[in-house]
Amino acid sequence: MSQHVRMAKLPNVLSTDDLSLAELCAARIDGELMPIDEGWAPVDEPDLPSLRAAAIALRAPRSLVIERRSAAWVHGALTAPPAVAQFCVPRTARVASVSGPRLLVREVAIEPDEIVEYRRARCTTPVRTGFDLLREPAEADDEVEAIVTSLCGDDAELPRALRRRLEASTRMPHRGLALHRLVRVEAMLADERRREGAGVSRR
């Protein structure tokens, strides 16, 4: 890399805590860095969930967990991160109140095995991400179903895992809504498989 970003042990996602804004902008003009959410990454950095998670995590302390639409972007189910990043914190955790104009944080009941631990960020697993989105009444049905369908696209086991999770949560609020949405997700996935089997492109 050039003199703008040639510095030992820089993280794969940079912010103005690592380099000045002038240096970051100069490196972008030189074609060495690209913007990713709130951060900057080398143009040759693989676009992996860990990279996207690190970019979103620049907005909040690592003790928070990336969730819902933000987690869907981390897992590749959205093409762009939501304007307002969504985080959660376990109800049992001792975390100071966190707020910001592009940040939404809520307390939830969540188990350690429902969290993916990246080097610089924490994110809900694909199963927990889909589970949270399916039962969110404030979200539009068609948008949730499209996101969860995309989330399940490369993981044939995920729809079954979501159904098991929802069916086991007998006292969960909005369970009926979540199950109805999942039925439509399963139908869309089945339709996609039929189209692929017939040689018809998704597009």
Image (spheres, grey):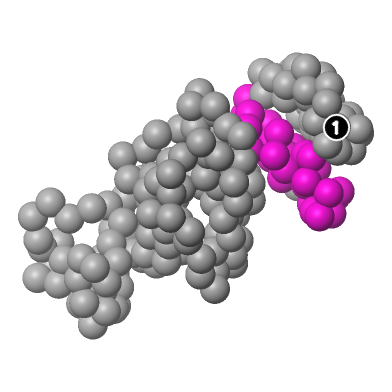
Instruction: Say which quarter of the image contains residue 31.
Output: bottom left
| Picture layout, residue 30 above or below residue 154 | below
Q: Is residue 130 magenta?
A: yes
At x 12%, y 51%, the residue is 9
Residues in magenta? 127-156
The quadrant of the picture occupied by the N terminus is: bottom left
At x 27%, y 72%, the residue is 16
| Picture layout, residue 118 above or below residue 12 | above
| Picture layout, residue 42 above or below residue 120 | below
Q: Position of residue 51 (x, y in %)?
A: 38, 48
* Residue type pointed to by label 1: Arg
Q: Nearer the viewer, residue 200 or 107?
A: 107
Q: Position of residue 176 (x, y in %)?
A: 91, 32
Majority secondary structure in the magenta region: helix
Q: Secondary structure at mark 1?
A: helix
Q: Position of residue 169 (x, y in %)?
A: 78, 23
Residue 5 visible in this rendered orientation of the protein: yes
At x 37%, y 37%, the residue is 118
Residue 29 falls left or right of residue 132: left
The residue under label 1 is 175
Residue 32 falls left or right of residue 111: left
Residue 48 visible in this rendered orientation of the protein: no
Within 10 Å of the Cα at label 1, are there few (<14), some (14-19), or many (20+) other Cα atoms? some
Q: Is residue 185 magenta?
A: no
